[in-house]
Amino acid sequence: MTGEGADGIGLFVISGKYSKESGECSWINQYVGRHAVEYKGYREGKGIWGNWVIGSLKGGFHIWPLSEGPRLNVAEE
């Protein structure tokens, strides 16, 4: 998988892989001109669960479909 985007940290490029058979996935989120974050996890019914690593720092994550998470209050213009 590949992609690009932006968040509160900055612009980033994503490169990784996903196995439909096992549900395992891994990717690197490289911030342009900054650090990279390595993600490894697996997909299950409520999203993707796993761990992230930035150098010697590490932690857990859960990414879920928007329809499964809290509602966002977005003002219409």
Image: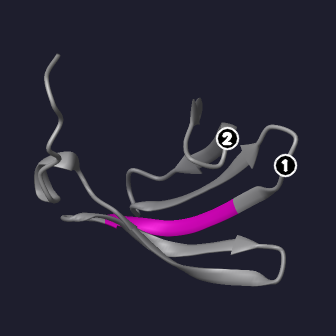
Determine whether, in the image, residue 33 is placed left or right of residue 74. right
Q: Are marks 2 and 1 in contact (CB under 8 Å)?
A: yes
Determine whether, in the image, residue 69 is placed left or right of residue 36. left
22, above or below 67, in the image: below
Magenta includes 61?
Answer: no
Q: Residue at x 39, y 50 (%)?
A: 20
- What secondary structure characterizes most of the magenta part? strand
Q: Residues within 10 Å of mark 1 (few under 14, many from 20)?
A: few
Describe the element under mark 2 as helix, strand or loop.
loop
4, above or below 54, in the image: above
The quarter of the image holding the N terminus is: top right
Decide which of tag 2 and tag 1 comes sooner along the chain. Answer: 2
Q: Which residue is mark 2?
A: 10
The quarter of the image holding the C terminus is: top left
Res. 64 mark: none
Q: Residue at x 20, y 65 (%)?
A: 46
Give the magenta range: 38-43
Describe the element under mark 1 as helix, strand or loop.
loop
**Looking at this view, is 11 or 75 the one in front?**
75
Q: Residue at x 27, y 58 (%)?
A: 64
Q: Which residue is mark 1?
A: 34
